[in-house]
Image (cartoon, coloured by chain):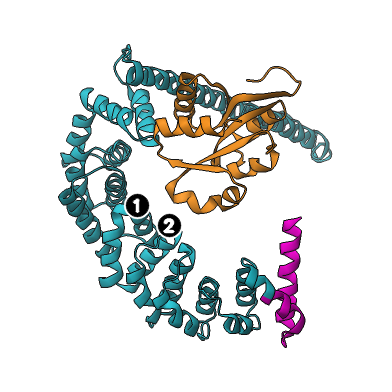
Chain colours: A orange, B cyan
């Protein structure tokens, strides 16, 4: 999905890290409607690779991903340029302590589409 | 997947060559001129075996290729349906074709991942296209196969439609255990997320209550059902805490601890006096995980720091560090507990507050127990490292 090899700072861009196609498409659809640019990643290796090319303004991070737990991505993120929104089901809330201690935002699934867009917009630098 | 197929093919080729090599080198000396048939037979067997390996590998290769193509097709379908359904839900654009199985799966995923008006519109589309009627027909028919019944219940669990709740409740008494379990979770999920009327909440909560106390569901299924019911399951949880077996009480305590809920503390506190040590520990865990220890429980929590059972003392220690003002003498004693986990819980708990850190520093120098001094100093070192 990412062509250029040079690293780009894209503060207005949102990176979606979500393995379910329908959910990712919904998130992209909602953010595009709000006028935001989106980069999509379907698994952890793809997200790690994308982060070596792009520094987005916000990462929307699912927890259950093929190739590893979503929280494993936290160490690859430049916190000075990127905010994180962790998306998780209500039964997984106890697993995000580490993320919350770093000040990341949290939104449980199922989510309200309007709240999702508003949260992402607020997290953009 | 393609790489795996190539690897299998390469392995089979190597095996074929090895078989031929074995035939030519190891058995050559045993061949006698009088037995002219042995040699061709051996070669034929080796070649046939090799061909067999090749054909098997080729079949596996084709199967893997088809499986990958099928996955790609279903991903493409899911993407297509996601875009069509969202365009329909948000902009009123027609979906251009009736919902097929792929469309249904996508609709249910979208319905499940969000709530609100758009999510309800997707549910209505499911009804309009006749899928709900079809599902209810499958459930009500006596001779529906178990597989079809299970698939139907899974769809209805994602759909969360009030019209499906009565038929799902009927499945709680089905003869097949898997069907009953799926129905229980489907009802719990619906009750947890649907804005039902009060009497409907009561009716279906009672159905779940009856199912749980019947003892036909595992601990994990009971935990999952209560978790899915979320705050709508609090009344049921209270009933189970007060009037059920110790195993179900433990289930409720575990769910409350995971949810970090303080809403049932009044009903949890009496369990601090339970005879069953796991119930005492479970109740303490609920209090400590909620981050709020009610004043009326302080005295009992401090008593439990001297409980003869280690895991009860461990949970009591975790709760004690939340008591205000900090019970320094008790924590000082717990730092010298014979069990490392208890000492560690006391030290880590103290590390969370300024007063606690002061006590830790003192313990690191002056505690009479050598292990207490060690755990205090280790904890302080960890805290310093994290601060850096």
Q: CA distance from mark 1 to mark 2?
A: 9 Å
Boundaries of the magenta span: B359-388
Residue appearing at x 51%, y 74% in the figure:
B324
Residue B286's x, y, as percent? Answer: 43, 67
Whether label 1 touches label 2, CB < 8 Å: yes
Is residue B363 depicted above or below B19 in this figure? below
Mark 1 chain: B
Percent across and percent down for residue B284 are 45, 72
Helix, strand or loop at mark 1: helix
N-term mark: 1 or 2: 1
- How far from the left and from the top, in percent, is residue A115? 42, 34
What main secondary structure does the magenta stretch of the protein show?
Answer: helix
Q: Is residue A18 left or right of residue A76?
A: left
Q: Residues within 10 Å of mark 1 (few under 14, many from 20)?
A: many
Above or below, A50 against B368 in this view is above
Residue identifier under label 2: B259
- In depth, the one of B101 and B63 nearer the eye is B101
Tag shown at residue B230: 1
Does the magenta segment cover residue B370? yes
Percent from the top left, x then y, of residue B29?
84, 39
Would you call the spot at circle 2 few (<14 residues within 10 Å), some (14-19), or many (20 or more)? many
Above or below — where is B267 with respect to B98? below
């Amino acid at each position: 999905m990412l062509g250029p090899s040079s690293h780009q700072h894209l503060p207005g861009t949102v990176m979606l890290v979500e393995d379910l196609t329908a959910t990712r498409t919904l998130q992209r659809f909602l953010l595009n409607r709000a006028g935001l640019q989106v980069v999509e990643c379907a698994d952890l290796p793809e997200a790690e690779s994308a982060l070596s090319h792009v520094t987005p303004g916000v990462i929307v991070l699912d927890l259950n991903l093929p190739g590893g737990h979503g929280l494993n991505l936290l160490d690859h993120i430049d916190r000075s340029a990127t905010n994180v929104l962790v998306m998780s089901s209500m039964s997984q809330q106890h697993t995000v302590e580490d993320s919350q201690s770093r000040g990341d935002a949290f939104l449980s699934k199922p989510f309200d589409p309007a709240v999702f867009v508003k949260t992402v917009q607020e997290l953009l630098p | 997947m393609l790489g795996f197929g190539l690897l299998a093919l390469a392995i089979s080729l190597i095996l074929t060559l090895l078989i031929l090599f074995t035939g030519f080198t190891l058995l050559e000396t045993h061949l006698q001129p009088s037995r002219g048939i042995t040699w061709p037979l051996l070669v034929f067997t080796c070649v046939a075996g090799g061909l067999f390996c090749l054909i098997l590998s080729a079949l596996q290769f084709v199967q893997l290729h088809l499986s990958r193509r099928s996955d790609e097709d279903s991903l493409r379908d899911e993407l297509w349906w996601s875009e069509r359904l969202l365009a329909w839900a948000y902009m009123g654009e027609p979906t251009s074709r009736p919902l097929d199985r792929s469309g249904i799966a996508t609709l249910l995923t979208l319905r499940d991942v969000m709530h609100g008006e758009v999510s309800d519109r997707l549910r209505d589309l499911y009804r309009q296209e006749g899928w709900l009627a079809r599902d209810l027909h499958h459930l009500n028919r006596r001779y529906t196969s178990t597989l079809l019944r299970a698939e139907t219940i899974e769809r209805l669990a994602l759909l969360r439609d009030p019209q499906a709740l009565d038929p799902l409740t009927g499945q709680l008494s089905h003869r097949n255990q898997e069907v009953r379990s799926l129905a229980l979770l489907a009802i719990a999920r619906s009750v947890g997320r649907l804005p039902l009327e009060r009497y409907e909440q009561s009716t279906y909560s009672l159905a779940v209550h009856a199912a749980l106390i019947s003892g036909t569901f595992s601990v994990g299924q009971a935990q999952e059902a209560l978790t899915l019911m979320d705050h709508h399951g609090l009344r049921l949880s209270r009933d189970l805490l007060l009037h059920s077996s110790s195993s179900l009480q433990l289930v409720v305590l575990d769910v409350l601890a995971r949810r970090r809920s303080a809403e049932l503390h009044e009903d949890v506190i009496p369990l601090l006096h339970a005879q069953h040590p796991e119930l005492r520990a479970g109740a303490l865990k609920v209090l400590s995980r909620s981050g709020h220890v009610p004043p009326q429980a302080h005295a009992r929590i401090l008593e439990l720091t001297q409980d003869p059972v280690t895991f009860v003392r461990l949970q009591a220690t975790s709760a004690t560090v939340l008591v205000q003002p900090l019970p320094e003498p008790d924590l000082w004693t717990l730092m010298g507990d014979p069990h490392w986990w208890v000492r560690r819980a006391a030290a880590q708990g103290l590390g969370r507050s300024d007063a606690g850190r002061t006590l830790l520093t003192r313990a690191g120098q002056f505690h009479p127990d050598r292990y207490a001094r060690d755990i205090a100093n280790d904890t302080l070192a960890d805290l310093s490292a994290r601060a850096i």
